[in-house]
Image (cartoon, rainbow, N blue to C red):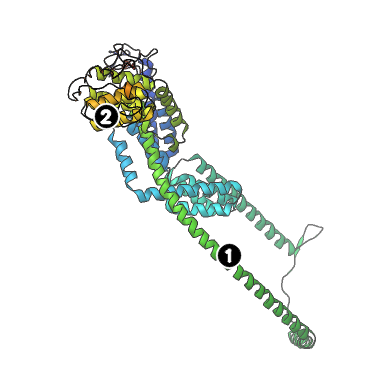
Amino acid sequence: MNCFHCGNKLGRGDMCLTCGQDVRLYKKIVACSWHYYDEGLARARERNLSGAAESLRNSLFLYKKNTQARNLLGLIYYEMGDVAQALIEWVLSDNLEPSDSRAAELLGKVQSDQVGLERVNLAIRKYNHALKYAKSGSEDLAVLQLNKVLSVNPRMVSANLLMALLQLHLEQPEKAEKYVQAALKVDRCNAVALHYRDLIHSREGRKAAAKERADREKAAMDRQSQIIRQPGGDDVIIPTYRENRNGFRIALTALGGAALGALVVGYLIMPSRINSLQSDFNQTINSYSERLSAKEAVISANENEIEQLNGQIEALRGDVASADENTAGVAGEYSKLLQASQAMQDNEYLLAAQLYLTIDPTLVSDDTFSQIYASLNEEFTTNGYTVLFNAGMGQYNAGQYEAAAPYFEVCVSLDGESLEAKYWLGLSYLNAGEQELAYEQFNAIIAADPESDFAGYAREHMRASGSTTAGDNPGGGAAGTPGAENVPAETEPADPQSGNAEATDPQPESTTPESSAPPETAPADVPAEGGANAGDTGGGQENPPETTEPPAGEEPAQ
């Protein structure tokens, strides 16, 4: 366990041996976090995944750097079908403790299966559609979407529970119980699933009791129909059979009635019945003809709709591909943001600024991400240029030209209109032997403001290093171009391999005011090791020194 104040390893006492900080309460908090982790691990072994997730979230609430709890929480989310939440937990664990190979291993296994990720993304989208249909009352459409989701990811607990709820609304308790059992098979103690199961059993019990009561009442009524109650209290049972004493007479009467009935039917009823049937048949034929015409119209409309749906399917496939790219992009932006924050905590201001410039905040809409990015943006917008410029000047004055260049590069990225940062970046490249890169910065200065002093200094350095295009820009010092009288006539070439390239003081060609020599070293009031202490990454300096004042001349205009 490391001290929360200085980061050094703690002993068994209640005080940090390095910084003297009281760590008694801190140790208790960490111990409580590990207690919740043990509780979550025990619940997970019992398949109580929802209870285990709750314990692990409590553990991370107390101590967010408990990577073992975070890795286990991601595994539980993955087991319950929530792959996106599992990836977030593993990315956070990998950035909080890069040496933890377990989180990297889990991420690698999931991200290596691109086909599986595509199916998971499609299942999540269909689940969201089903939820939308259920809220709007379209329960049949919601059931169709959930069937597709469960065919892809049958262990998704939330999809099983939503399907069980819809089946209860559709009065299908047997199907609802099947989905509840599927959810309980993954998460044995899920509170919502247990509630649904109790609700199903209570409904079935009421139906069985009502059926039994109806059967009893019917049996009682049957018995009462065969019993005659006497006033004296003696009941008389009526026999349910009679002797057939006149069987021949009854048979003869039945045959006569049947013959008479046949005659009546044949002569009176059948003709009208035949006419009625013929009329019904004709109406049926007309009805079927109309239906056939309507079906043909519907088929034609369905064919057009099928063509439109095929187009939508192709568009959805493109959306799925872009969703995969967005998932990878979101994870990358989270990683870069966390690395930049860690660099700020480790007092690596240059690395933090470089990572900040590579972050695209439009790819992530999470509130936590936006808050952290806003704090970094405020820091680098307010103090980044000054701190990094002063640090670069410190490296330049120490003769570390290659080390100074990255500081000025970031300054140019933060303020693309700063001629000052481009000028010192060009000098750093020139003294480091990178003439092409130096010429790019000098030409950019000349193109941005040909009349500025920095443009004149840039031309001088380009001539001194042997460039043949230094005077071809407007405002330069070439013969026959505007402003030629303000450019020194000749200079001695600077040695790019030397510690500091020194340009000679040029002599004016005419009686125009004397121009100053190009500055090659930082002013005297710039610190030698950067513009801020190692710990001043949050606020910078309150009164940064002037770094753009050229020696013995007029101040360059930007």
Residue visible at 56% across and 52% down in the picture: 167
Residue toward you, 244 or 449 = 449
Mark 2 burial class by Cα count in 10 Å: few <14, some 14-19, many 20+: many
User: Which of pointers 2 and 1 lies earlier in the amino acid sequence?
Assistant: 1
Circle 1: residue type = Ala
In this orientation, does residue 153 appear?
A: no
Q: In x, y percent, where is residue 349?
A: 33, 23
Q: Which residue is mark 2?
A: 438
Q: Which residue is mark 1?
A: 301
The N terminus is located in which quarter? Answer: top left
Q: In x, y percent, where is residue 338?
A: 36, 30
Residue visible at 53% across and 51% down in the picture: 176
Residue toward you, 92 or 153 = 92
Q: Secondary structure at mark 2?
A: helix
Residue visible at 49% across and 58% down in the picture: 311
462 vs 226: above or below: above
In this orientation, does residue 247 appear?
A: yes
Q: In x, y percent, where is residue 175?
A: 53, 54
Q: In x, y percent, where is residue 269?
A: 78, 84
Circle 2: residue type = Ala
Residue toward you, 176 or 528 = 528
Asked whether, in this view, residue 104 is left or right of residue 170, the answer is left
Asked whether, in this view, residue 272 is left or right of residue 318, the answer is right
Mark identifier at residue 61: none
Q: Quadrant of residue 428?
A: top left
Q: Residue furthest right?
A: 231
Mark 1 burial class by Cα count in 10 Å: few <14, some 14-19, many 20+: few
CB-based contact (under 8 Å), mark 2 and mark 1: no
Residue visible at 24% across and 27% down in the picture: 463
Q: Secondary structure at mark 1?
A: helix
